[in-house]
């Protein structure tokens, strides 16, 4: 294992780029995972089937960790039923909780998500809740058994970037579990910014799926996430409130 692994529950990963696979064709899924060097990919349980049609599970590369989501759930009980189905399909214990009752803006329901985290954790799952960036709700989810927290950067599918930056920074500073930005990231530069402020990982889907060159965009996201993580660990330089400061000394060398 590397010295800077992403640790979620009892699992270790060297990649911090998580792929949301919902908007890719089945044929493109494998290519994007390879170009992005992705180790975790989400899976909508409704895209799996055993009735002879193409199954998204058949297009996942060997060794990939599947992160099934509870997309479509409107309550904690529905989320548990979807999670149990995913476990029966062999997807393991890690599960992304998505509970959305707002059909216009598709914003997650934090209150119901807290209930779902507790319910799933009590049933042997490692929940990763998708949520509105709220430090108090995040603490409640962590206490209920969340393995990581997945706040949105901006509305899902919007590609508008890190609009919730300040709230996510509070969560990074206030939580002891990984904070993974999920939803709204539209450019590799925005993914880099999320990593620079200390996020543990970034999940992207629409930004890559809607690019003109999908495999190249997956590679760009991988590199941006790596650069942001490196910058965070290096410790970014200070920001001056005044106008400027000479980058070289102005005294002590002209007379030498």
Image (spheres, grey):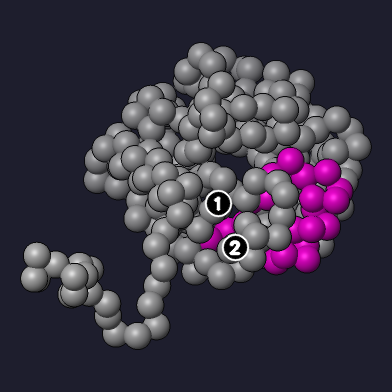
Looking at the image, can residue 129 be seen? no
Q: Quadrant of the C terminus?
A: bottom left
Magenta stretch: give its range: 134-155
Q: Earlier in the sequence, mark 1 or mark 2?
A: 2
Q: Quadrant of residue 166?
A: bottom right
Q: Does dot 2 land on a helix, a strand or a loop?
A: helix
Please name the residue shown 70% across and 18% down the image.
Answer: 90
Q: Position of residue 148 (x, y in %)?
A: 69, 44
Does 114 appear in magenta? no
Query: Please, which residue is most extreme toward the bottom here?
Result: 242
The residue carrying mark 1 is: 199
Q: Quadrant of residue 77?
A: top right
Residue 211 is left or right of residue 127, and the answer is left
The residue carrying mark 2 is: 168
Q: Position of residue 99 (x, y in %)?
A: 72, 53
Q: Is residue 184 above or below residue 129?
A: below
Please name the residue shown 38% across and 77% down the image.
Answer: 240
Circles 1 and 2: CB atoms closer than 8 Å:
yes
Does 146 appear in magenta? yes
Please name the residue shown 58% across and 35% down the image.
Answer: 6
Residue toward you, 121 or 173: 173
Residue toward you, 165 or 116: 165
Crowding near the residue tagged with mark 2, few <14, some 14–19, many ≥20 C-alpha atoms within 10 Å = many
Q: Does dot 1 land on a helix, a strand or a loop?
A: loop
Q: Which mark is residue 151?
A: none
Crowding near the residue tagged with mark 1, few <14, some 14–19, many ≥20 C-alpha atoms within 10 Å = many
Question: How many badges with numbers are in the image?
Answer: 2
Q: Is residue 71 above or below residue 126?
A: below
Residue 113 is left or right of residue 251, and the answer is right
Q: Is residue 167 above or below residue 12?
A: below
Residue toward you, 112 or 197: 197
């Amino acid at each position: 294992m590397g010295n800077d692994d992403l640790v979620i529950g009892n699992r270790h990963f060297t990649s911090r780029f998580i792929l949301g696979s919902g908007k890719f064709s089945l044929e493109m899924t494998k290519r994007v995972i390879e170009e992005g060097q992705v180790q975790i990919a989400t899976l909508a349980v409704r895209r799996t089937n055993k009735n002879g049609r193409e199954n998204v599970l058949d297009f996942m590369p060997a060794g990939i960790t599947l992160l099934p989501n509870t997309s479509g759930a409107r309550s904690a009980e529905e989320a548990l039923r979807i999670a149990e189905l995913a476990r029966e399909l062999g997807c393991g214990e890690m599960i992304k909780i998505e509970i959305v009752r707002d059909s216009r803006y598709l914003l997650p329901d934090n209150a119901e998500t807290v209930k779902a985290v507790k319910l799933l954790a009590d049933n042997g799952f490692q929940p990763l809740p998708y949520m509105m960036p709220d430090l108090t709700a995040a603490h409640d989810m962590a206490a209920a058994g969340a393995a990581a927290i997945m706040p949105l950067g901006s509305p899902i599918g919007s590609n508008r970037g890190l609009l919730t930056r300040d709230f996510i920074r509070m969560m990074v500073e206030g939580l002891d579990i990984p904070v993974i930005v999920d939803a709204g990231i539209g450019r590799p530069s925005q993914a880099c910014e999320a990593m620079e402020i200390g996020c543990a990982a970034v999940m992207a889907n629409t930004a890559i799926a809607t690019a003109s060159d999908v495999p190249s965009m997956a590679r760009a996201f991988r590199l941006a996430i790596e650069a942001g993580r490196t910058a965070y660990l290096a410790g970014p330089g200070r920001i001056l409130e005044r106008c400027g400061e000479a980058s070289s000394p102005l005294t002590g060398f002209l007379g030498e």
